Image: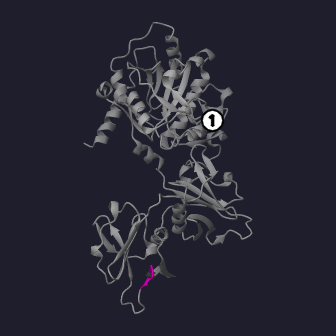
């Protein structure tokens, strides 16, 4: 059986076991664990945080990442509720700490934006991958980066376009063959001569080699077939080619033998164009630059037949025309690039040019007179019932989908009792909060993990009660015996964010 299937089954079984009630005074799962190793990481203020030097006796440790669009903000808000409910005396003894599982993206600056947006001040830590890996190992978790990336990239990149009249539309990245050919040819400094007619672009010359007027040979378009691992002459014109599906193209003089051309590098995973000249000499270029906003813009607009014009200034692209609407010569307005900010859940004016905005997911183009607040949210991020009146009672917005859908309430509002799709004023009702995804959050007694909370939901009041009891145990010699088997449970169960699947290590790994 596939290893991932076995792991998933094991996780499901152990999470069911975890629902068994504890024979202890704690509401969460009491642990019998060795102390974690000391570590020093960097917080959102770019200051070092050394765990053993913290002034607090009790810590709450959460593992989050800022690109997570759903569960991590909920965890953060729920822990904020726990923190706000502690008495001043207990709050003096407790420190909340969040540790990123996505250090490649979560810089101190990004963590600072995240904490500002959620109005929390506790340390949010990042650092070198090697140091963080030791931290993960010490807590007994394994972070699967590919799962994080898969969750983040669960939507196709799109371009939102706002025209000069204020009309908005959204287009997916779906470049045709001619657009990809243009992008690669520009990077390679190649020249293509082509005419455009009823059947799209007809290439007549490449790098100064023109096909003869007597048609004794012509430039033939070929694509690489990954299944047969062979080059094949295209049955459609270059404008009808899906460049995502067929990203490797070969232009050959019709009198040449394409069987001599090797397969693309990396089995065609990188877009490329190869030229086979009449004298059987070849030229090849694979796309060297990372996928950026220039590629996304060209590929999205061309897929719906909208022309774009860029000026190339010292290797940097400046957009001057969309759908044949050019910026005026008097400079009264220009096309402005915006980027979707997953932390603030809104559009930000881009601080970099299209070539430096790498791996974009959602971008928008609009006249610079357009307010970013007037640019619509990307369609894939909108709740399915966004047009329904009074979403979240008009005091928030919805995130997630299916059973995981929940409101992100505005300041001063919280979930209604038993209804995560409502937002009510805090002073109007006593609200019980829950986390809508399986996770593990640790309550630490000194350097030792003492309580772990897991499952699909937990109540802030119950979590706070455990924190308060751990605080009380600091001044009392009485303690409950740990429940047999809980060490093994924590050693193998998983931290699942619906984005980052984090598995607890085995007992053997802890003892190694």
- State the image coordinates of residue 467 (x, y, percent, origin top left): 52, 19
- State the image coordinates of residue 182 (x, y, percent, origin top left): 49, 71
Disc 1, SS:
strand
Farthest residue, direction front: 314
Q: Classify 444 as above or below 339.
A: above
Res 312 seen here: yes
Magenta highlight on residue 162: no
- Quadrant of the snapshot with the N terminus: top left
- 256 sits to left or right of 108: left
Residue that badge 1 annotates: 423
Q: Nearer the viewer, residue 225 or 404?
A: 225
Farthest residue, direction top: 477
Magenta highlight on residue 207: yes
Q: Nearer the viewer, residue 80 or 416?
A: 80
Main secondary structure type of the part rendered in magenta:
strand
Residues in magenta, as a range? 206-210
Res 17 seen here: no
- Quadrant of the snapshot with the C terminus: top left
């Amino acid at each position: 059986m596939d290893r991932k299937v076995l792991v998933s089954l094991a996780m499901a079984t152990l999470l069911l076991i975890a629902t068994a009630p504890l024979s202890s005074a704690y509401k969460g799962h009491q642990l019998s664990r060795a102390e974690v190793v000391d570590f020093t990481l960097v917080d959102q203020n770019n200051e070092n945080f050394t765990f053993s030097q913290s002034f607090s006796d009790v810590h709450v440790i959460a593992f989050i990442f800022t690109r997570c669009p759903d569960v991590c903000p909920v965890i953060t808000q729920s822990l904020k509720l726990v923190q706000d409910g502690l008495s001043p005396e207990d709050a003096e003894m407790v420190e909340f700490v969040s540790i990123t599982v996505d250090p490649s993206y979560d810089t101190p600056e990004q963590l600072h934006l995240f904490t500002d947006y959620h109005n929390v001040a506790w340390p949010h830590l990042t650092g070198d991958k090697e140091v963080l890996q030791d931290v993960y190992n010490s807590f007994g978790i394994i972070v699967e980066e590919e799962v994080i990336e898969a969750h983040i990239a669960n939507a196709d990149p799109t371009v939102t376009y706002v025209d000069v009249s204020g009309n908005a539309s959204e287009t997916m990245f779906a470049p045709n063959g001619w657009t990809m050919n243009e992008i690669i040819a520009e990077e390679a400094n190649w020249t293509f001569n082509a005419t455009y007619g009823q059947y799209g672009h007809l290439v007549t010359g490449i790098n100064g080699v023109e096909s003869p007027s007597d048609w004794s040979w012509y430039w033939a378009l070929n694509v690489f077939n990954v299944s047969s691992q062979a080059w094949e002459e295209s049955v459609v014109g270059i404008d009808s080619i899906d460049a995502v599906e067929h990203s490797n193209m070969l232009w050959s003089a019709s009198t040449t033998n394409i069987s001599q051309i090797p397969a693309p590098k990396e089995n065609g995973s990188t877009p490329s164009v190869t030229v086979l000249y009449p004298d059987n000499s070849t030229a090849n270029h694979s796309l060297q630059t990372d996928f950026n906003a220039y590629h996304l813009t060209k590929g999205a607009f061309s897929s719906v037949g909208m022309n774009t014009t860029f000026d190339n200034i010292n290797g940097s692209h400046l957009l001057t025309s969309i759908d044949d609407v050019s910026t005026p010569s008097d400079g009264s307005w220009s096309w402005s690039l915006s980027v979707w900010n997953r932390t603030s859940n809104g559009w930000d004016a881009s601080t970099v040019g299209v070539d430096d905005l790498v791996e974009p997911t959602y971008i928008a183009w609009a006249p610079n007179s357009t307010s970013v607040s007037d640019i619509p949210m990307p369609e894939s991020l909108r709740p399915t019932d966004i047009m329904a009146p009074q979403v979240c009672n008009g005091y928030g917005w919805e995130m997630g989908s299916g059973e995981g859908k929940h409101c992100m309430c505005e300041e001063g509002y919280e979930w209604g009792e038993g209804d995560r799709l409502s937002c009510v004023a805090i002073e109007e009702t006593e609200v019980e909060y829950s986390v809508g995804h399986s996770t593990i959050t640790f309550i630490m007694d000194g350097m030792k993990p003492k309580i772990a909370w897991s499952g699909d939901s937990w109540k802030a009041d119950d979590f706070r009660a455990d924190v308060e009891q751990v605080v009380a145990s600091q001044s009392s010699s009485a303690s409950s015996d740990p429940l047999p088997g809980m060490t093994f449970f924590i050693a193998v169960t998983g931290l699942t964010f619906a984005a980052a699947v984090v598995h607890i290590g085995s007992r053997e790994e802890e003892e190694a």
